Image: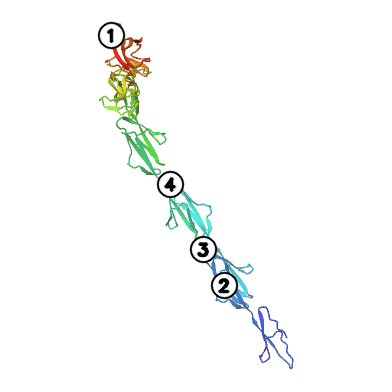
């Protein structure tokens, strides 16, 4: 025999007429020995409920049971987390079952049921308290829960952003732009305030400029009143200009509306002062004598005569002002300037040949005395001072030589020294001199004299006329004592002895 249960049921057992359990086999086979009554017993199937979820939330079964008999009523409930909402129940295949958070159904099989949750969508509402605008950076005003929203405030000209507040007017932030995570419908208001601008005033020295109320900082759009007062050296206000030098107004006082940091300069008409120039001797004034406006720069120049230079400028009280040429200064009053000149110093150079030392080189004022001295080294004699372009003019044979420096005087001198060889005059005269060295006869201060040189025995060896005061003649003289006779008409007669070794 076989028992066939209905859907949702299963076979349990066979019993007889006395309700005795006979078997749980199905089908059931037995040997028939009498009239027999059998009863098949059936029971409802037991099914399992499995819950799952998609998104942020939780699920539960109302009676906390997860196994039910066939057609038992199952009640499931969905609880979304904050910021989320329940969307629907689906079966294992994804088929939608219900959109109610509390869902009841008759269980007819093992069932998997899934709760679907989704993020809430919230709105961002932005306002401006005036003088600017507020907006999201992406121009979207609806976002899902915990999305990052970026808002920015753009102030009107002359204003600046101060802060964000919420719907209760609580201060939230001074950041601009502002980023925040959206967790609810949110209202933000942007607050703006007027900019503070500075007024910078200037004027030439001695003049006064000020604001009427003494302030230098004002809010955007405020009216500013500035006043100017002329000081010493000036007559009255000409105009006001801005930082670029553009003319603004000639009114005094001047009123304007402040819209930015502003620099204003007051320009005044200056008094003109005369600068007069004078000069003493040895130069002239070149330029600069005229009228100048107060506090402007003057430039005066002078031209000294040859061999002179500008010593200084002096005022009417003879106070020294400057030695600059040209001389620049700021005019603040009528002035009388005199150019004072001074003679240039002249460089006198003194050098020497080998065999001695000299002094006297240096700078000298004209018309002052120049002193030079030559000192011969041991074994040498001083023979004279030479000057001229090639040091070919003898100016003195005195070792100590002085002269008054004039414009026509020589400025370069050379002391000439010669080595002693024993061939000098035996008795040397005060002026005329002679000596013999290295095959050359040297004659000093004997220009124009007829020279006759002979031996002690009266033998004449040389005769000639000296052609300069510093003459040199090549002559080969054997060792011995010689007599020099020098005659120049009736003017003078010189006799000297000299020795040749």
The Cα–Cα distance between marks 4 and 2, rounded to whole angstroms, is: 59 Å
Q: In which quadrant is the N terminus drawn?
A: bottom right
Left or right of residue 364, residue 70 in this image = right
Report the residue marked by disc 3: 83
Residue 355, position as x, y percentages in the image: 33, 24
State how far apart marks 4 and 3 are (Cα): 38 Å
Q: Which sits earlier in the primary sequence, circle 3 or circle 1? A: 3
Q: Quadrant of residue 212?
A: top left
Q: CA distance from mark 2 to mark 1?
A: 164 Å
Q: Nearer the viewer, mark 3 or mark 1?
A: 1
The numbered dot on residue 492 is 1
Residue occupied by mark 4: 159
* 295 or 138: nearer the viewer: 295
Mark 2 element type: strand
Q: Are marks 4 and 1 in contact (CB under 8 Å)?
A: no
User: Which label was assigned to residue 76?
Assistant: 2
């Amino acid at each position: 025999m076989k028992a066939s249960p209905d859907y949702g049921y299963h076979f349990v057992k066979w019993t007889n007429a006395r309700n005795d359990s006979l078997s749980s086999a199905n089908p059931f086979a037995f040997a028939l020995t009498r009239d027999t009554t059998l009863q098949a017993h059936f029971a409802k199937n037991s099914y399992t409920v499995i819950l799952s979820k998609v998104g942020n939330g939780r699920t539960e079964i109302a009676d906390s049971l997860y196994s039910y008999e066939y057609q038992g009523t199952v009640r499931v409930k969905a609880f979304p987390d904050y910021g989320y909402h329940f969307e629907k129940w689906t079966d294992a295949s994804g088929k939608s079952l219900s959109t109610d958070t509390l869902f009841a159904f008759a269980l007819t099989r093992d069932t998997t049921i899934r709760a679907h949750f989704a993020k809430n969508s919230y709105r961002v509402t932005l306002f401006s308290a005036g003088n600017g605008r507020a907006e999201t950076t992406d121009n979207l005003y609806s976002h899902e829960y915990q999305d990052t929203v970026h808002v920015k405030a753009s102030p009107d000209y002359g204003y600046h952003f101060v802060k964000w507040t919420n719907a209760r007017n609580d201060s939230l932030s001074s950041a601009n732009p502002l980023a925040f995570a959206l967790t609810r419908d949110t209202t933000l208001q942007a607050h703006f305030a007027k900019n503070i601008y500075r007024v910078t005033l200037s004027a030439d020295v001695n003049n006064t400029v000020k604001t009427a109320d003494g302030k230098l900082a004002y809010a955007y759009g405020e009216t500013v009143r500035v006043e100017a007062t002329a000081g010493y050296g000036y007559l009255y206000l000409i105009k006001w200009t801005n930082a670029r030098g553009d003319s603004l107004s000639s009114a005094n006082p001047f009123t304007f509306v402040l819209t930015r940091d502003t620099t204003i300069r007051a320009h005044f008409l200056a008094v003109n002062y005369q600068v007069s120039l004078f000069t003493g001797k040895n130069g002239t004034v070149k330029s600069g004598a005229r009228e100048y406006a107060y506090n402007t720069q003057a430039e005066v120049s002078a031209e000294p005569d040859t061999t002179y230079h500008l010593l200084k400028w002096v005022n009417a009280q003879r106070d020294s002002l400057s030695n600059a040429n040209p001389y620049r200064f700021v005019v603040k009053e009528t002035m009388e300037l005199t150019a004072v000149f001074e003679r240039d110093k002249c460089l006198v150079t003194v050098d020497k040949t080998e065999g001695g030392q000299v002094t006297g080189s240096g700078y000298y004022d004209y018309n002052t005395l120049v002193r030079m001295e030559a000192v011969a080294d041991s074994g040498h004699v001083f023979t004279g001072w030479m000057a001229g372009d090639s040091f070919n003019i003898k100016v003195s044979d005195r070792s100590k030589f002085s002269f008054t420096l004039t414009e026509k005087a020589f400025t370069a001198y050379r002391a000439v020294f010669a080595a002693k060889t024993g061939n000098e005059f035996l008795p040397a005269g005060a002026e005329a001199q002679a000596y013999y060295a290295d095959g050359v006869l040297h004659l000093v201060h004997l220009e124009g004299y007829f020279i006759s040189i002979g031996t002690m025995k009266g033998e004449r060896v040389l005769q000639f006329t000296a052609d300069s005061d510093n003459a040199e003649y090549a002559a080969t003289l054997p060792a011995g004592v010689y007599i020099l006779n020098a005659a120049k008409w009736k003017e003078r007669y010189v006799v000297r002895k000299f020795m040749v070794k």
